[in-house]
Amino acid sequence: MTTKEQLIKEIDQAPDFLVEEVLNFLLFLKVRLKQKTSEATTPDTHTPLSNDSQTFLEAISQITAQVPQDDWKTLPGDLSKNLDHYLYGSPKTER
């Protein structure tokens, strides 16, 4: 059985919410591959992740620095705890 066939078999058996997550991840990977391919032919100096030696936390810091402070204030205080609620409408966790 090929990897593609095995993946299709697993997707057939997975619940819909998990299939959506897998699809989102696959689409994300395709975009990243396209970006890396275009960077190889014409480097983009505006891409914060173009430096391979950059750490994950440095990249996150660069991205978050681009968000205005007023926008940070609009985020709910329980966002990390109830992310699924805000993204998908699942019930809130009240811990």
Image (spheres, rainbow, N blue to C red):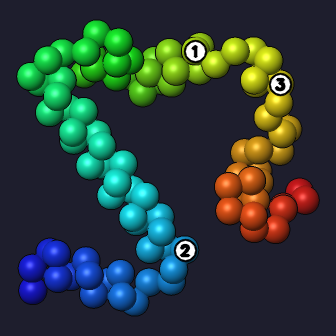
Between the residue at mark 3 and the residue at mark 2, the CA separation in whole angstroms equals 30 Å
As displayed, is residue 13 above or below residue 87? below
Q: Residue at x 76, y 59 (%)?
A: 85
At which x and y percent is residue 60?
51, 24
Residue beneath label 3, please?
73
- Which amino acid type is shown beneath numbered disc 2? Phe
Q: Which mark is residue 16?
A: none
Q: Residue furthest right?
A: 94
Q: Residue at x 35, y 12 (%)?
A: 46
Image position of 79 (left or right of 9): right
As displayed, is residue 38 above or below residue 86? above
First in sequence, mark 1 or 3: give its number. Answer: 1
Residue beneath label 1, please?
66
Q: What is the quadrant of the N terminus in the image?
A: bottom left
Image position of 45 (left or right of 70): left
Image position of 89 (left or right of 59): right
First in sequence, mark 3 or 2: give its number. Answer: 2
Residue beneath label 2, please?
17
As displayed, is residue 90 above or below residue 27? below
**Which secondary structure, mark 1?**
loop
Please say if the residues under marks 2 and 1 sit with CB atoms less than 8 Å apart: no
Is residue 53 among the parts visible in the rendering? no
